[in-house]
Image: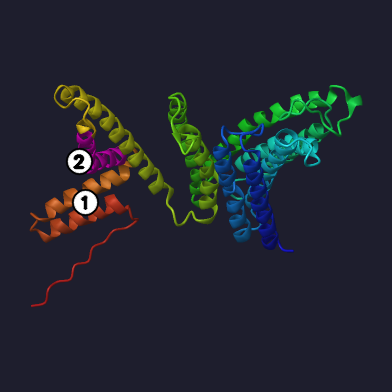
């Protein structure tokens, strides 16, 4: 079977395992498994969103089967969906309906052995292999083998460790080796922190690749950096939302829902960077993010502030009327277009100075064109504008003389 054909059954396995996990989520009802995000509804949303990893991996593996990123995402999808299905199964047979199905303890054990290696491999190796699917240089191959060895040691030690399980502390491994004592637990205590320590090394590798790259590869890396920046920028707002109490949509906390939606940004950014970077200019996306992010914050602040002001001013006359909300809504609607224009001009001036200067140069030339009568002076001004805006290696102007 060719690599392209192999990707499809792997993706199908992810889809099937996700369906099994959702099925046990429904069967368990109010009993949440030990790795629950916060509610059954949110667990279901996260389970579906995690399919973006194997789906993007499928697209990459079919188009570029030699790129390891596609297979990395497919493997991560299999591991994540397998862990979810196993935890649902274990919860059902150990908690919801004890003894109705066999192998509950074994399912819980395999879930213990899968979750951290899958998460570590998907993140650490992504930083080192993105976007070409190969390490930055042959000298970085040691890191790939080190991560592979570390996750393998963690998985085997978890399976054979006689200590209590992570997700079900009341149970011990059904295949644990009692004669090892605390040796395997010590191995786990070393292997687990090593994975997180490797995170810094992986980010150094990505930074070095970005510094040495140029052209298409540099723009591809910019997509991953952009997705990570969105995460960092959203974290303070999500933490603030989480502290506001019981803000829910469909029974799901707003902060948890938004955090879950951000999960899909990483694989989508990677997929665009590898497969569609020529269709979507990262500079345009960043610019629009800055403009509309600042616009949203401005309008939201204006709305909340105007509601408070209008209520304070109008409450003696209107009482508890919704007039303040209506007036604030109208004010924000009227502010939208001028605010967007001002913010966009500010973003261009601060972050896209070359384009801002180009627009100013063309605007100045257009005003001068209306008043210029000397053809030679006009030609000189035109060549200057073209040189400033387009920056060509050579500029020449040919004018056809009118024949009388």
Q: How is the image coloured?
A: rainbow
The x and y percentages for residue 167 are: 71, 30
Q: Residues within 10 Å of mark 1 (few under 14, many from 20)?
A: some
Task: Answer whether labels 1 and 2 touch (C-beta < 8 Å).
Answer: no
323 sits left or right of 178 in the view: left
Mark 2 = which residue? 334
Mark 1 = which residue? 362
The x and y percentages for residue 70 are: 63, 52
User: In the image, is residue 3 above or below residue 368?
Assistant: below
267 sits left or right of 165 in the view: left
The x and y percentages for residue 345 are: 26, 41
Alpha carbon separation for disc pair 1 and 2: 29 Å
Quadrant including the C terminus: bottom left
- On the question of residue 239 being in view, the answer is yes
Quadrant including the N terminus: bottom right
- On the question of residue 134 being in view, the answer is no
- The residue at 28%/51% (across/down) is 389
| Most frequent secondary structure within the magenta stretch | helix
404 sits left or right of 220 in the view: left
Which numbered mark, 1 or 2, is in the foreground of this view? 2
The x and y percentages for residue 43 are: 58, 39
What is the number of callouts on the image?
A: 2
Q: Which residues are magenta?
A: 326-350
- Where residue 39 sits, quadrant-wise, is top right
Viewer-proximal residue, 74 or 15?
A: 15
């Amino acid at each position: 079977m060719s690599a392209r054909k192999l990707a499809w059954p792997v993706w199908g396995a992810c889809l099937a395992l996700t369906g099994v996990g959702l099925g046990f989520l429904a069967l368990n009802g109010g009993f949440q498994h030990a790795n629950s995000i916060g509610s059954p509804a949110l667990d279901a949303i996260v389970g579906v969103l995690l399919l973006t990893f194997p789906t993007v991996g499928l697209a990459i593996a079919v188009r570029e089967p030699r790129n390891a990123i596609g297979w990395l995402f497919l493997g991560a999808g299999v591991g994540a969906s397998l862990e979810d299905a196993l935890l649902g199964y274990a919860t059902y047979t150990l908690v919801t309906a004890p003894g109705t199905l066999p192998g509950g303890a074994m399912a819980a054990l395999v879930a213990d052995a899968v979750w951290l290696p899958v998460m570590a491999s998907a993140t650490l190796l992504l930083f080192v292999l993105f976007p070409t699917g190969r390490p930055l240089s042959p000298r970085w191959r040691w890191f790939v083998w080190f991560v592979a060895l570390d996750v393998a040691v963690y998985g085997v030690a978890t399976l054979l460790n006689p200590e209590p399980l992570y997700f079900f502390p009341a149970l011990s491994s059904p295949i644990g080796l009692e004669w090892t004592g605390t040796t395997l637990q010590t191995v786990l205590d070393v292997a687990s922190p090593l994975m997180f320590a490797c995170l810094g090394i992986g980010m150094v590798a990505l930074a070095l690749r970005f510094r040495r790259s140029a052209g298409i590869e540099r723009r591809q890396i910019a997509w991953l950096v952009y997705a990570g920046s969105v995460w960092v920028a959203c974290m303070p707002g999500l933490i603030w939302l989480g502290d506001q109490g019981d803000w829910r949509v469909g029974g799901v906390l707003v902060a948890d829902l938004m955090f879950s939606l951000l999960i899909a940004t990483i694989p989508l950014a990677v997929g665009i960077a590898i497969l569609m970077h020529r269709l979507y200019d990262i500079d345009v996306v960043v610019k629009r993010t800055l403009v509309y992010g600042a616009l949203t914050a401005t309008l939201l602040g204006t709305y909340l502030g105007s509601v408070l002001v209008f209520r304070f001013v109008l409450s003696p006359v209107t009482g508890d009327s919704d007039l303040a909300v209506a007036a604030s809504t109208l004010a924000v609607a009227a502010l939208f277009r001028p605010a967007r224009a001002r913010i966009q001009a500010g973003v261009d001036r601060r972050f896209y100075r070359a384009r801002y200067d180009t627009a100013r140069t063309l605007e100045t030339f257009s005003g001068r064109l209306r008043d210029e009568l000397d053809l030679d002076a006009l030609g000189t001004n035109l060549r200057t504008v073209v040189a400033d805006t387009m920056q060509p290696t050579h500029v020449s102007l040919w004018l056809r003389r009118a024949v009388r």
